[in-house]
Amino acid sequence: MNKPRNVLTIATGKKLYVDMAVNLARSFWLWNAEIGINFYLATDQPQLLAPDVKHFVKIIPIEPGALGEGFSPKLHLDKLAPAGQTLFIDSDCLIYGNIESVFKKFEGHSVSVVGGYISTGEWFGDVAAICKKFKVKQLPKFNGGIYYLENSGKAAKVYGLARELETQYDEIGFVRLRERPNDEVIIALAMALNDGKPIADDGTIMSDPLSCPGKYSTDVFKGKTSLYNPPKPSPLHQDWYPFEKVHPLIIHFLGHHSLNYQYKKDICLLQAASTNELTAWRKISAAINIELPERIKETAKNLLRPVYKLIFGTRRIKPSERL
């Protein structure tokens, strides 16, 4: 008998996160409506769910603050995941194709991620020192936009340990992210202590504009993605990311990248499709009103940035709307 397959996301606190979860759900349904994968949303604000997704989104109600704040809710996936195979996807992601292949790659892993290993250097702390302290050879290194688990005693053991480690976060030597414990390094250590293994990152499952800071393009209705990590000696090159160009099924619009025109254009068109208003003119309008102004603005910024810095100095970083 085939195991149930589930996508799970979390949206707590601000309405912004429920809106993002709706965008993710729409992109999921566009490409995966007919293949028997369930979509679950764990939220403390189910009343904010858009009407067009209510027929397929299964709500897991949670009380405000019950799973902690910041990144902490992701340390409770074992409590939220239904039976079967569950793919957790952060709400600030969009899906650009059929994700059956992702479930096949993960199948058989109690807890897993997409990534590789790290044993030295800095990753929210001194990795070598932390490995030595806990007598592990290495840690899985990954982007926490995706987690996979098959709800079982093994998964409960890993996540239970992760919640314990969170209480010792500073003592362990981990560095905080936005003044909060980072779920990635906690899960990495919990996996390492339970012989958990990542599946190899080949750039086809998920990527993000932080790993690929060059120009990138998306088209959610054509299922096309292209992200670029400029090679050396470009100042944009990310030395820790092993790929130059990738075409992932899932893009993680982490941090300020959800303000990029690529995300805003795709969610605009997904919303139009949800009310049967997606026309050729609507696509042209999105290109003119969303994409074109941002392209012009970005080009002007790149050209004038040296002059601006010379006159005004370094610009103050704006507070994130997510905090």
Image (tube, helix red, strand yellow):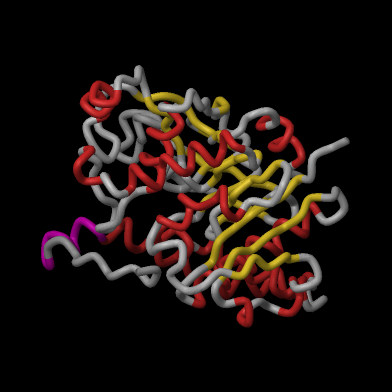
Residue 195 vs residue 98: left or right? left
The answer to whether 113 is drawn above or below residue 282 in the figure is above
**Residue 2 sits in quarter:** top right
- Quarter of the image with the C terminus is bottom left
Q: Is residue 107 a member of the stretch shown in magenta?
A: no
Displayed quadrant of residue 240 = top left
Judge by depth and name the residue closer to the eye, 307 or 270.
270
Relative depth, front residue between 139 and 150: 150
Q: Is residue 306 part of the magenta span, yes or no?
A: yes
Magenta: predominant secondary structure element? Answer: helix
**Stretch in magenta:** 305-312
Vertical order, 110 against 266 (above or below): above
Question: Residue 223: x and y, percent?
Answer: 72, 49
Residue 180: x, y in percent?
Answer: 29, 56
Q: Nearer the viewer, residue 229 or 103?
A: 103
Q: Residue at 79% of width from left, 52% of height from top?
A: 32
Q: Where is residue 164 drawn, in percent x and y?
A: 36, 45
In the displayed image of the protein, which residue is found farthest to the top?
Answer: 137
Would residue 233 be found to the left or right of residue 217 on screen? left
